[in-house]
Amino acid sequence: MFFAPRLVASFRVPANAPRVPDTAHTADTPAVQRWPHRRLVVIRRNDELLAYDLGRLVAGDGAPAARFPAPWPRGAGGIDAVSPNLDLAVFSGQHALHAVDAAGALRWRVRHACWSSPCSSFHDSYDEYAGSDGHRYPDWGSCWVSAYGSTAWAHVRIPLPDDVEPEYDEEWLVLDTVDGRVRGRASTDTAAVGSHHIPHPDPGQMGLSVGEGQDGAPLRWGRWDGTRLTVTRIGDDDRCLVDVSPCGTRFLTVAHEQGELAIHRLPDGAVTHEVAAYDRLPPHPQAPSQPEDEPFWDYRCGFVDERTVIASTGESDEEYGHPRHWLIDTARGDVLGQVDYPMPVSEAPMALGDGTWLTCGEED
């Protein structure tokens, strides 16, 4: 079955175009950072982080709502975060977390052990290792600013400089966004190649998905009660956390090898439905009659609303044509059908949880 979506709005994000005509790939694909009361489209350029208010974009205002100068180039750190009230950006780097205010000034920094293996030094600045072969392809952490803007969550490599008994590990930190004070910390028991945060509607809860390359994808669930950070291990380290439902009663994962998508319930993380792409989806229409590879899910998918998930098979489709997007019923785990766009799309969907989603069309 095919579903024809209704176009709510279309817009061009100016920062997605290179500043220099013959210079490609100067900005990351737009990402959505959302809280119950606000949604931002965030783009990391080589020298800055830009945040666009989604409501203003839909209304035709293409100007950034905020822009923050970056302390290191794109690709030299992890996943950065903007506060919902646009007064702060937290940059996740190889050697430190940097919080930059709306005027571009450094509000605070928290140094940590270097993410570049086997280096474990405490660097004072990016300039110390810029251009070094040993730091060219680092592992990386990530961060997120809570809905109230008062705390930030960050996944870092430790020790921290003031640790009395240094131990080489990875930790989840909860920090005060005013001064960077570490209010809570706990081990994640991971060995990350990279990580990303998935927020829960309750600002005292957070999901952390850690990629360990071929070794797995640990999923950690954090609870902050204002005094203590508690970290729970969910699953068998083989599922990538991709989204939490709007009311916070479910979350969504994609298996490490991308064959299955699963809907889980909270708070215990039990799987309620598993959707195997190779069993439920037809081959791409442009694929040969006996394709070598079966369809598999992309890691980016999400809750359109409480009743529906949207997912993509773009990676497995790219050899044959444009990516296909699919709607899935959350109550039964059934694949409802394929989204039939009026024009080709080039990216996986970014679900917004309110009955809508974003995707990117091809360049004109």
Image (cartoon, helix red, strand yellow):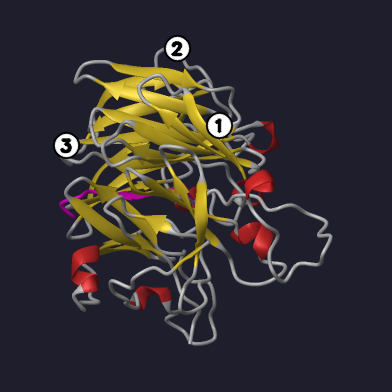
Question: How many numbered marks appear?
Answer: 3
Taking the image as shown, residue 269 lies to the left or right of residue 137, namely left
Q: Residue at x 24, y 64 (%)?
A: 54
Q: In the rendered structure, does residue 80 fall within the stretch colored magenta? A: yes
Amino acid residing under circle 2:
Glu
Residue 321 on image: x %, y %: 66, 72
Q: Residue at x 34, y 74 (%)?
A: 13
Q: Which residues are magenta?
A: 76-86
In this view of the protein, which residue sits in the foreground, 243 or 354? Answer: 354
Residue 271 on image: x %, y %: 49, 27
Kindly tell me whether residue 114 is visible in this rendering: no
* Helix, strand or loop under label 1: loop
Q: Which mark is residue 165?
A: 2
For residue 174, above or below residue 89: above
In three-dimensional space, the C-alpha distance between marks 1 and 2, rounded to whole angstroms, equals 15 Å
Amino acid residing under circle 1:
Ser
Q: In the rendered structure, does residue 253 fall within the stretch colored magenta? A: no
Kindly tell me whether residue 306 is visible in this rendering: yes
Q: Residue at the far front: name it.
A: 1
Residues at badges 3 and 2 in contact (C-beta under 8 Å)?
Answer: no
Q: Residue at x 44, y 45 (%)?
A: 329
- Residue corresponding to mark 1: 120
* Helix, strand or loop under label 3: loop
- Residue corresponding to mark 3: 150
Q: Magenta: predominant secondary structure element? A: loop
Q: Earlier in the sequence, mark 1 or mark 2?
A: 1
